[in-house]
Image: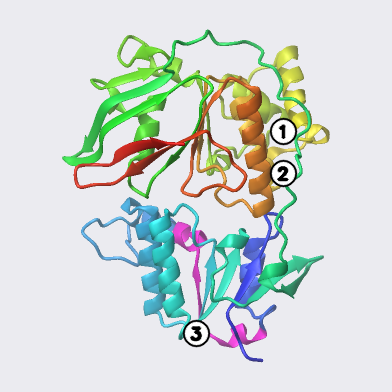
Amino acid sequence: MALHHAAFYISNNDNKEQLIDDLFKGRILKPLSELKGELFSDITLKKIIAEEIRHEHFGIIQSPKNSFQKYSEGEKKKLLLQWIIDQEPDYIIVDNIFDHLDVASQESIAKRLIELSQRVVVIQIANRKDDILSFIGKIYVDTDGTFTKYDRSVINNPDSTMYFVNAVPQPIQTYSDFDNPLIEFKNVNVSYDGRPIVKDINWRINQGDFWQLMGPNGSGKSTLLSLINGHNSKAYGQDITLFGLKKGSGESIWEIRKKIGYFSSDMAQQFSRMDSVEHMIISGFLDSIGLYVKPTDIQRERAQEWMNLLRMGHLKKRYFQKLSFGQQRLVLLARAMVKHPPLLILDEPTVGLDDENVMLFNQLINKIAEETSTTILFVSHRKEAGLVPIQIYELFPGDEGSIGRSRK
C-alpha cells in the first residue's frame, strides 16, 4: 500500500488523542506502523514546556532566551517544526497547525510544510476545512465511527440556519449609562525594558460598538487588553478613559473588572471542579471560579433562560466537564454575558473549535450584539466566517512600536 499525504477532517466530538495514537500504531494507515513519525502539535508543545518546568531543562532549543515558554506562539511552532525536520522522520502528523498564529506565521509554516512534503509524508489533522493544506489530496472524514475518504469539494460547509431562536435574557440589574466614549486611548505608548510595544494608540470605543481587534503575533493586542481590564500598571499616567472615567481618577481594579465580561479559549482549563452547567452560568454573576454561595431565585431564573437560549435546558444538572468541547465554549460565553456587562472581551474564543461550532459561536455573538447594549471586543487573527463586527482596529508593528488604525 503506497503512502500518500492525507488529511483527517474531524469535529470537536472526535477523540483526537485516540486518532493520533491509532495513526502512530498503523491502525488506520497500516504502513505508518513500520515508519518513523513525529507529531507537530500543541500537544507536543505542552509536553516540552511541562518537561522544562519539571526538570529546568530547555529541551529542543539552545538560546540566550533560555526558556521555551518565553517565545511567541509563532516562534514556538517554527522551532518545533525545525526540530522535527532535524529528526529526519519518514512522516509527520500535523495537528491544527494554524491555531494562535497570525497570517504571516501561517504562511511561513505552510511554506515549510510544502517544502517538507517533497521528501516526507504529511498527515494532517484539521478542525477547519479551509485549513487543509493545498497539496493534500486524500481527505478522510469520520462517518459513523469509520474514516471515509472524501473529495475536498464535496465536504459541506456547516448549516448556517439560525440555531438560537429565543431572545437574549434580560439583565437582572442594569449599569448606569456611561458618557461616550466608553473606552478611549489618546496617544498611548507602552514599552517594556526599553522595547517599544505600541506607539501613539488612538482608539475610541462607544457603548454598543462591536469591534474586532486584529494584528500579528507580538503586535500588542494583549497589551491593549491589559490596559483595559486593569492588569497593566502602565495604564497609569496615560490618557485613557475607562467606562467614562479617566484612568487614575480613583476607581479600583475590581470596580473596573465588575464592568467586564471576559472569555478566552483556554478558560475551560481553569474550571476543574465538578460544577453543573447551571452553577457555571450563575457563577458569572459573581465572577467566581465555581459557585460558593446559594444563588437567588432570580439568578436561577436567568440562568435557566440562558440555558434555554443555548438549547441546553435539559443539561442544567450535567457537570460542565462532561459537556462537549463546543458546548463548554457556549456555556462560558453565557457565563461572561449573564450579568450583561458594559464590555464583553472575547480573546481568541474560537481557537480549537471545528467549523460547525465556530458557526454556532459566531451566531451567538452576533445575536448578543444585535439584542443587547453590551460593547463587544472580539480578538482574533482570522476573519471569522459568519461574524459581523461593525468596525476593525488593526495593529501594524514597527521599529518604534505598533501603530493602530480603525476601519469598517
Identify the residue at horizontal 77%, vertical 37% (top origin): 318
Q: Write down the residue under mark 3.
A: 90
Is residue 290 visible to the viewer in this orientation of the structure?
Answer: no
Q: From mark 3 to mark 1, how far is it between C-alphas? A: 45 Å
**In the drawing, what numbered circle is on residue 277?**
1
Identify the residue at horizontal 28%, vertical 42% (top origin): 402
Magenta residues?
Answer: 30-48
Amino acid type indicated by mark 3 = Asp
Callouts 3 and 1 close, C-beta under 8 Å: no
In magenta stretch: residue 43: yes
Number of disc labels: 3
Give the mark, 2 or 3, whose residue is nearer the N terminus.
Answer: 3
Q: In this view, does 328 lie above or below 216?
A: above
Give the mark, 3 or 1, whose residue is nearer the N terminus.
Answer: 3
- Label 2's element? loop
Amino acid type indicated by mark 1 = Val
Badge 2: how crowded within 10 Å, few (<14), some, or many (20+)?
some
In the image, residue 159 lies at what x, y percent?
Answer: 75, 50
In magenta stretch: residue 291: no
Q: From mark 1 to mark 2, how far is it between C-alphas? A: 9 Å
Query: Which of the two marks, 3 or 1, is nearer to us in this view?
Result: 3
> Toward the viewer: 244 or 11?
244
Callouts 1 and 2 close, C-beta under 8 Å: yes
In the image, residue 38 lies at what x, y percent?
Answer: 49, 75
Q: In which quarter of the image is the N terminus?
A: bottom right
Task: Please give left or right for residue 200 compared with residue 357 in the image.
Answer: left
Give the mark, 1 or 2, whose residue is nearer the N terminus.
Answer: 1
In the image, residue 267 lies at what x, y percent?
Answer: 54, 39
> Furthest residue to the front?
408
Quarter residue 277 falls in: top right
Q: Write down the residue under mark 2.
A: 323
Quarter residue 190 falls in: top left
